Image (cartoon, helix red, strand yellow):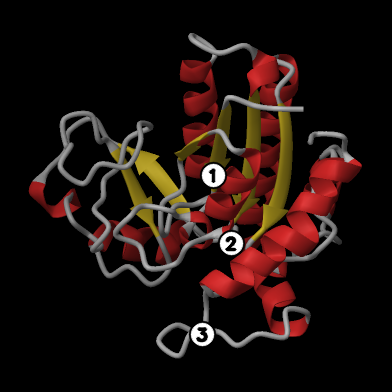
Amino acid sequence: MSYQLFISGGCSASFTHPTYRHRSWPVHVAKLLKCEHQDTALPAQGNGMISRRVMYAVEQALKSHSAADILVGVFWTGSERHEFYNDQIVKEFVDQSHWGNPISLRSYDPADRKNSHWILINPHYVKQYSETYYRVFHDSIDSEIKTCEHVLRTQWYLEKHNIKYFMGTFTQETFSRLEHPEVSWLYAQIDHSVFLPVNGIREWAIKSSGLEFDTDDDYHPSTAQNQLFTDQVIWPFLKEKHYV
């Protein structure tokens, strides 16, 4: 089976912008698929923005492609990352990280602020709105509830449009509070058959790749580890699902 477009989403572990030094798994998958690739990943974005940016990209792609010509791959990140929308962008919202925030639903472009209204918030950000959120509003159970809802929304959207897709996680911490009743009933509704058979690409790289992380970054899997992960995990899974 051949595709015209591969759409990928995730956080920094899935980011493939030319300025980023990690040649992540989507690059290797796209080469094997031999088709056009659109990356919607962005460092530090949470599962809400991962979901929205993937769905937006698919919605736009369906204007010129048939559903059968599109394959989607999504890697979910830690549930503690969040975002909010603000229509009145002020100076303090801009450039809160070196990758450039706020962001938009469109493809990453640090020069485009015109339609950028989503502001990312993370536990380690020092801006006042991040500090306020994590001091006053943040709760780990709430975060995992929202992650399950983001996954479900994305799955239901892709299935509605008959888009073939697969999913994975950056780390096993994406889902870690499954015993809680507010989380477990949502988690049970997720279609786990489309998830790669590993707990996280980071854990796999540590335990199973047999390769070392880059000396300047021991958190993200290296180019070689991503290549091996694609060859040994993703591609066999796509064959098993009869996607390729």
The circle drawn on residue 78 is 2
> How far apart are labels 1 and 2 at the CA level?
14 Å
Q: In which quarter of the image is residue 140?
A: bottom right
Q: Position of residue 35 (x, y in %)?
A: 56, 33
Q: Alpha-carbon neighbours of circle 2 within 10 Å: few (<14), some, or many (≥20)?
A: many
Marks 3 and 2, the one that precedes in the sequence = 2
**Amino acid identity at mark 3:** Asp
Among the two numbered marks 1 and 2 on one chain, the one whose residue lies closer to the N terminus: 1
Say few, some or many: other residues with alpha carbon within 10 Å of mark 1 (under 14 / 14 to 19 / 20 or more).
many
Tags 3 and 1 in contact by the CB under 8 Å rule? no
- Alpha-carbon span between mark 3 and mark 1: 22 Å
Q: Which of 99 and 190 is in front in this view?
A: 99
Q: From the image, which quarter does the C terminus lie in?
A: top right
SS at mark 1 in the image? strand
Assess disc 3: are there few (<14), some (14-19) or many (≥20) residues with their C-alpha within 10 Å of its C-alpha.
Answer: few
Q: Position of residue 158 (x, y in %)?
A: 68, 24
* Coordinates of residue 169 in the picture (x, y in percent): 68, 58
The N terminus - image quarter: top right
Answer yes or no: is residue 102 visible.
yes
In the picture, measured across the screen, residue 207 lies left or right of residue 45, that is: right
Q: Residue 9 carries which label?
A: 1
Residue found at x 41% / y 58%: 43
124 to the left or right of 152: left
For marks 1 and 2, give the one nearer the viewer.
1
Q: Which residue is nearer to you in this view: 48 or 181?
A: 48
Q: Which amino acid does label 2 sit on?
A: Gly
Residue hosting label 3: 218
Alpha carbon separation for disc pair 3 and 2: 17 Å
114 or 1: nearer the eye? 1
Asked if residue 107 is positioned above or below residue 141 in the image, the reply reads: above
